């Protein structure tokens, strides 16, 4: 009698040693009493396609994907979800039993679940949203904000052409502003989102003037190291509703875990503390 394979999953990128996902998945596997392992794999770019084809044969059921491969894996996958295609990037791969690779993006789901869990009174339709940044994370955020009824996105990026590309892709509800106006466009917004790496440990400071923040705004930062960024600290001081970026990391991992290991994990305070430890 042959024994069933223990399911394996991984996060791939380069570099990937900094990822907190292995700690998160190990906690969930243990909490649910499930067999399985989740590991970080640093994949050289010239070995990416070969690795993706080999891993299903070794018992892997799926992968999380981090930089710099979120766009590249879409070209290798056999099928791509509408969400991933709209966002232009995939962060979750599902290996079918026949070896085919399905690419999906759960960043927008994670972003929205984080807001709904930590700011349940937030009304997306109550006013415009300011979004700082125009990278892959911004695409996921804009798609999810428009999906829940935000009436207008005020988008600004340090290099304007990247923002203009997003406006072309997402339509007239996205308005692009020069980075020098970044502080001014916050005025009258209901929601403010930083999707850039500014303010992250080891990165340049987030220097946008924040005197337009008012207490009726929801402010969130995708940066979670440090957990309390300058943007969030100033927003808290102004009485804003503040949501840190760690919850997005946790929630975006839920669909993959459920698909790969067969149980839906909880994102609770114990989960946060495990990942922060």
Image (tube, rainbow, N blue to C red):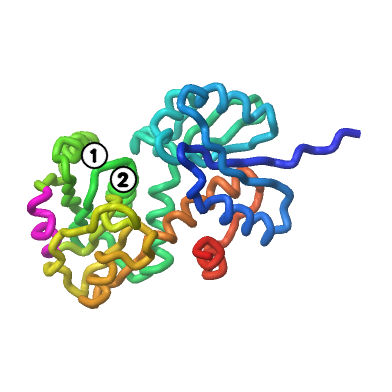
Q: Which residue is mark 2?
A: 143
Q: Picture coordinates of residue 72 (x, y %)?
A: 41, 28
For the residues bearing labels 2 and 1, Cβ distance under 8 angstroms: yes
Magenta stretch encompasses residue 184: yes
Q: Is residue 39 magenta?
A: no
Residue at image location 23% in from the left, 71% down from the top: 234
Task: Give percent across and percent down for residue 224.
Answer: 38, 59
Residue at x 91%, y 34% (from the top left corner): 1
Give the residue number, with chain letter if any, for mark 1: 170
Estimate how packed mark 2 is, as few (under 14), some (14 to 19) or many (20 or more) residues with alpha carbons within 10 Å.
some
Front in this rendered view, residue 88 or 194 = 194
Q: Is residue 195 visible?
A: no
Element at label 2:
helix
Circle number at residue 274: none
Q: CA distance from mark 2 to mark 1?
A: 8 Å
- Determine whether 161 is above or below 141 in the image: above
Segment colored magenta: 179-188
- At which x and y percent is residue 148? 32, 54
Q: Is residue 152 above or below residue 218?
A: above
Badge 1 crowding class, 10 Å Cα cut-off, few under 14, some 14 to 19, many 20 or more, is some
């Amino acid at each position: 009698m042959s024994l069933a394979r223990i399911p394996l999953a991984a996060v791939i990128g380069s570099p990937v040693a900094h990822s907190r996902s292995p700690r998160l998945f190990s906690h969930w596997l243990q909490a649910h009493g499930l067999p399985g392992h989740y590991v970080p794999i640093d994949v050289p770019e010239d070995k990416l396609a070969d690795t993706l084809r080999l891993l299903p044969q070794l018992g892997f059921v799926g992968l999380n994907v981090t930089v710099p491969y979120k766009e590249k894996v879409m070209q290798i996958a056999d099928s791509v979800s509408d969400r991933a295609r709209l966002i232009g990037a995939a962060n979750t791969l599902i290996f079918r039993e026949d070896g085919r690779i399905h690419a999906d993006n759960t960043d927008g789901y994670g972003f929205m679940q984080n807001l709904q869990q930590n700011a349940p009174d937030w009304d997306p339709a109550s006013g415009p949203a300011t979004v700082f940044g125009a990278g892959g994370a911004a695409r996921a955020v804009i798609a999810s904000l428009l999906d829940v009824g935000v009436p207008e996105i005020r988008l600004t990026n340090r290099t304007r052409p990247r923002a203009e590309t997003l406006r072309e892709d997402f339509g007239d509800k996205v308005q692009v502003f020069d980075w020098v106006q970044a502080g001014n466009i916050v005025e009258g917004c209901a929601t403010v989102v930083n999707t850039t790496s500014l303010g992250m440990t080891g990165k340049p400071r987030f220097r946008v003037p924040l005197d337009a923040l008012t207490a009726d705004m929801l402010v969130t930062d995708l940066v979670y190291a440090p957990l309390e960024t300058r943007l969030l600290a100033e927003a808290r001081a102004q009485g804003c509703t503040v949501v840190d970026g760690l919850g997005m990391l946790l929630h975006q991992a839920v669909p993959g875990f459920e698909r790969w290991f067969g149980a839906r994990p909880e994102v609770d305070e114990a989960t946060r503390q495990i990942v922060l430890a």
